[in-house]
């Protein structure tokens, strides 16, 4: 076994990326679906929602679609992790001189790379539709850092979900959670436009906090309170998801 740091994880990251490239259905879903949603909301609902958004709707909706894009990609991780368990891949790795946990973190690292690429495609389409960010270089770096952190945390949660799932159907249910939460946030309409009973949840849930932080960066006016709240939310969820993933992986080994 190589003594290079993260050597095993990098090998499994490459494996996961190759599997993604060969899985045309998942690749299309991860890239085409967010782009289709972006075009749908901007071209069909954009004129009607522009007044509620308080400005160009493309500028308003793009940060939300960027996070929705992360949900599509992370959902693939839950089913991939469960498939490795169901096929006995992890059990075979435990008998070999490699870190079996490397396959889990390989899925996670590959998801971050895959999602950053698909998010870049979404941003290019948004620019073509009229998205006009006013971010400076430091603010663009803030956007990339926040997106990478959000994707990492969401993928760690997906990995834990895949480890806990008892069937491929239950592993696939993660996509429902990951894709439904942005619709209960300020991704597509301001919180004032939502039903009264949803406003409290929508205003304070982590997806809304991340979206508002992205909007601030993109507009060139980042809000320090939103940045701090996003950091706390993502940091806390990341720690919980990591601990949960490690414990579920260890329990799978004993089971």
Image: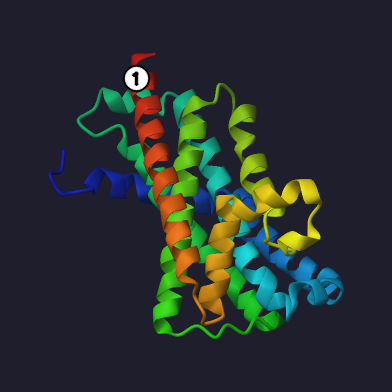
Does 183 sit left or right of 138 as displayed? right
Q: Is residue 27 visible?
A: no
**Residue, disc 1:** 253
Quarter of the N terminus within the rendering: top left
Residue most toward the left?
3
Q: Quadrant of residue 243?
A: top left
Please give left or right for residue 59 compared with residue 105 in the image.
Answer: right
The answer to whether 170 is drawn above or below residue 149 in the figure is above
**Residue 18, x across and y down, in percent:** 45, 51
Viewer-proximal residue, 238 or 75?
238
User: Measuring 73% from the left and 81% from the top, which residue is drawn there?
Assistant: 56
* Residue at left offset 54%, top offset 69%: 214
Q: Residue at x 41, y 83 (%)?
A: 137
Residue 35's spot in the image, x, y percent? Answer: 68, 66
User: Which quadrant holds the C terminus?
Assistant: top left
Q: Is residue 161 visible?
A: yes
Q: Where is residue 147 in the image (x, y as percent from the top left)?
A: 48, 62
Q: Quadrant of residue 43?
A: bottom right
- Disc 1: CA contacts within 10 A as few (<14), some (14-19) or many (>=20): few
x, y (%) of residue 70? 56, 55
């Amino acid at each position: 076994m190589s003594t290079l740091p993260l050597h095993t994880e990098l090998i499994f990251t490459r494996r996961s990326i190759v599997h993604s490239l060969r899985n045309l259905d998942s690749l299309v879903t991860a890239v085409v679906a967010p782009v289709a949603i972006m075009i749908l909301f901007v071209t069909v609902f954009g004129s009607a929602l522009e007044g509620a958004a308080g400005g160009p709707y493309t500028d308003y909706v793009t940060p939300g679609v960027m996070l929705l894009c992360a949900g599509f990609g992370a959902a693939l991780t839950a089913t991939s992790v469960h498939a490795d368990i169901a096929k006995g891949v992890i059990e075979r790795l435990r008998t070999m001189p490699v870190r079996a946990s490397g396959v889990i973190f390989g899925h996670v690292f590959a998801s971050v790379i895959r999602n950053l690429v698909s998010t870049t495609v979404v941003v290019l389409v948004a620019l073509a539709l009229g998205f006009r960010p006013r971010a400076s270089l430091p603010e663009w770096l803030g956007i990339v850092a926040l997106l990478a952190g959000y994707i990492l945390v969401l993928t760690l949660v997906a990995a834990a979900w895949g480890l806990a799932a008892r069937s491929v159907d239950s592993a696939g249910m993660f996509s429902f959670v990951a894709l439904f939460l942005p619709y209960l946030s300020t991704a597509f309409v301001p919180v004032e436009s939502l039903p009264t009973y949803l406003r409290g949840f929508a205003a304070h849930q982590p997806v809304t906090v991340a979206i508002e932080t992205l909007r601030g960066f993109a507009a060139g006016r980042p809000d320090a309170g939103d940045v701090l709240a996003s950091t706390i939310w993502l940091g806390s969820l990341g720690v919980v998801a990591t601990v949960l993933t490690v414990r579920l992986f260890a329990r799978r080994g004993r089971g």
